[in-house]
Amino acid sequence: MSGRTELRKDPATQRWVLVHTTPFPGGNHVPCPFCPGQEGATPPEITAYRTNGQPPNSPTWLVRVIPERAPLLQIEGTILRDGMGLFDRVSSRGASEILIEHPEHHAAWDTMPCADIERVLWMYRQRVEDLYRDREIRSVLIYRRDRHPEAPIQHPFSRILGAPIVFDDIREELKAARDHYARKQRCLYCDILRQENHDGERIVVQTQHFLVYTPYASRRPYETWVVPRAHHHRFEAISAAALGDLASTLQVTLRRLHTVCPTSPVELVIHTAPNAAMRLRPDDWCTLAEDYHWHLELVPIPSLAQGIGGFYVNPLAPETAARQLRALE
């Protein structure tokens, strides 16, 4: 198996590791390659939203998606699965995309109009739908993190990864959801929502379409989940009404997290179901539509690790975190 990037599976933990030998671009970029007018400094765009019918790669965009210049996963070729004795590896077939969220260099979700956040969410939805048309892509991950003051690029952007494997966190969730459904014939996440509504003490925000809460076993201080109240396993099936609600819910939640954790970048990850068209075995995900429930996870990332030997240690009870976040209404 050739190439500068490959996925390797740790036989002791069953977790995947992406071995990426191409160095990431570094240094400060002046002018910013993501600002309008600098489209020639990036790879040609994959897609974009524009209001006036201007051609691709012109500087009149609202949201723009480009391939990553040093991709973690590459769209060309086919998946190669290989083994060397005990060790398994998979070629890095997939997709690595950068979603440039706004033309303004210093745009922030805390302050931008909700319509602008909604536009970004629509592009997330569109990209997941498009990538899942590729039968070689098994799982898509949407990820964004607040820009650190020392980051080489300050322009707001998200990353979209499509992989030939199921990302480990999603895989663990899928197993727990499938096992719960096999025992009780109910969605685990719907049961969690009922329990959180009953307890009430970890709820941060309730809207027509979403429940925002700090999980019972939060891994880090102020870890917050945004979960749709109606059951569905795919983010990319979200309705227009729910997407608008999600935009305003995320803005409110992020403002509160930034207030209580002003120096910790907030990480946002969308957890959606894998590509059901890419089954490795006929019995894969037979109850996926019934047992899994898409959601978003928001976590402020502390400057110092809070754990021991891979075991999470949370110094703040989620009930206290929720009470503090609710108080910011």
Image (cartoon, rainbow, N blue to C red):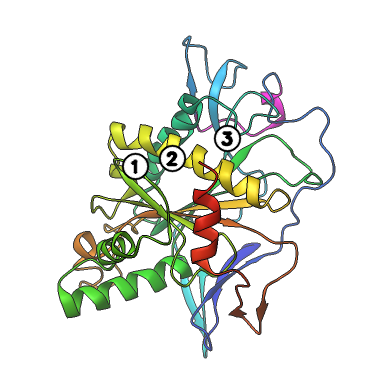
Mark 2–mark 1 CB contact (< 8 Å): yes
The residue carrying mark 2 is 249
User: Circle 2 — which element?
Assistant: helix
Give how far across and how far down residue 291 sits, in percent: 23, 65
Few, some or many C-alpha atoms within 10 Å of disc 2 (few <14, some 14-19, many ≥20)? many
User: Which numbered disc covers residue 207?
Assistant: 1
| Residue type pointed to by label 2 | Thr
The residue closer to the viewer here, 83 or 114, is: 114
Q: Which of the 4 image quarters holds residue 157?
A: top right
| Residue type pointed to by label 3 | Trp
Left or right position of 174 against 318 = left
User: Circle 1 — which element?
Assistant: loop
Give how far across and how far down residue 35 sits, in percent: 69, 25
Q: Of marks 3 and 1, which one's residue comes earlier in the chain?
A: 3
**Gap in Å between the C-alphas at discs 2 and 3?**
11 Å
Left or right position of 315 against 277 = right
